[in-house]
Image: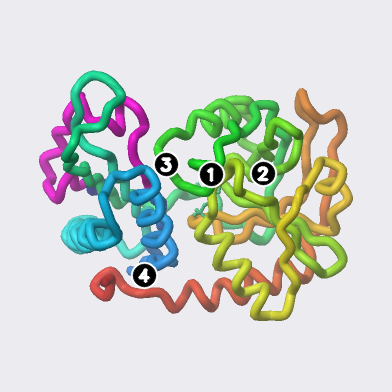
Amino acid sequence: MQAVTLVNGSHNLGLDALDRGLAYGDGVFETIALRQGQVQLWQGHCQRLTKGLLRLGLVPDAASAAALVSTLIADVKAAYPVFEAVDGVLKITLTRGVGGRGYAAPQVSQCTRIVTLAPWPSGREGLSTAGVNSRLCCHPWSVNAALAGLKHLNRLDQVMARNEWQDPDIHEGFMLDPEANIISGVMSNVFIEQQGCLLVPALDQCGIAGVMAQEVRHIAEQAGINVKVGQINIAALLNADAVFMTNSLNGIWPVVNLRPSTCQTKTHSWPISDLTVTLQQSLAVRLSQQPLVSQLC
Ligand SMILES: Cc1ncc(COP(=O)(O)O)c(C=O)c1O
């Protein structure tokens, strides 16, 4: 099965070398799971995309953002029949489009839309039940309240952190802020369990406000589980009763150990808790009731 990509709705993939997404990372993106023809957590992805478009000023107002999302939906509906599979990864990238030399944005910009449907990644099937191995990354998050939470195209902190290891047996890395508080995984959000409650890091200075994390949090709160936002230092991480990470493709990944790295000397292990398994089960039910591509609006 081949990936299908549409640029501005066309199979002609000519991207302008002066696109500001390429030149400055001037844009936003979403990575979305397509399972059994259902687009998972579409509303959450649209909300974050819209927030990013408005925060970066890629569109002037909410009505323009909604119009752009409608065009994107048409792109997804056009790409899906060509893809010929019901499982895959839907990636949407929106940039400010073509600009001249220099940082100043054009007075009027025409966003570039890139929609890709790619095969579902293999090799991750058992990790939700067996749990994942992790390590601590040395490269910290850059702090910037104005960009915190967004899924913008500048992901160099994640690239630097991910390049710290090659061992395929390490599935994720914890990333810290400059004060050594846990913020996230390289590609996930972090939850720690303490005495039946969940604690998540504050993401107001750095980090990505994950769509899956938002869903898991909602499920936990509906089940009466207290979810607190606060600082998580390394000691709190190590003392947690259980730890899990979330993202749109992996759902809930229990973290079963922290392996030694340059920043951490000993291996530390966590169990997979009953709470983690219960949340996984509730999430599976929610994720089986998502809109089909044809129902997106
Ligand atoms: C740094 C980081 N945090 C969190 C997430 C999880 O976001 P989502 O749940 O929207 O996939 C990602 C996903 O790629 C990420 O790269």
| Image side of residue 99 versus residue 275, left or right | left
Q: Position of residue 276 (x, y in %)?
A: 72, 66
> In the rendered structure, which amino acid carries the disc numbered 2?
Ile
Magenta stretch bounds:
6-29
Mark 4 within 8 Å of ligand 1, using the beta carbon: no
Give yes or no for residue 27 being in the magenta stretch: yes
Residue 249's disc is none
Which residue is depicted at the point 66% across and 37% down? 175
Q: Is disc 3 placed on a helix, strand or loop?
A: loop
Return the residue nearer the eye: 223 or 60. Answer: 60
Return the residue at label 4.
Answer: 38
Return the residue at label 1.
Answer: 148
Q: Would you call the spot at circle 2 few (<14 residues within 10 Å), some (14-19), or many (20 or more)? A: many
Return the residue at label 2.
Answer: 183
Q: Position of residue 140 (x, y in %)?
A: 65, 30
Label 4 vs 3, first from the N-terminus = 4
> In the rendered structure, which amino acid carries the disc numbered 3?
His
Tags 2 and 4 touching, CB below 8 Å:
no
Which residue is depicted at the point 79% across and 67% down? 197
- Distance between the Cα atoms at labels 1 and 4? 29 Å
- Distance between the Cα atoms at labels 1 and 2? 11 Å
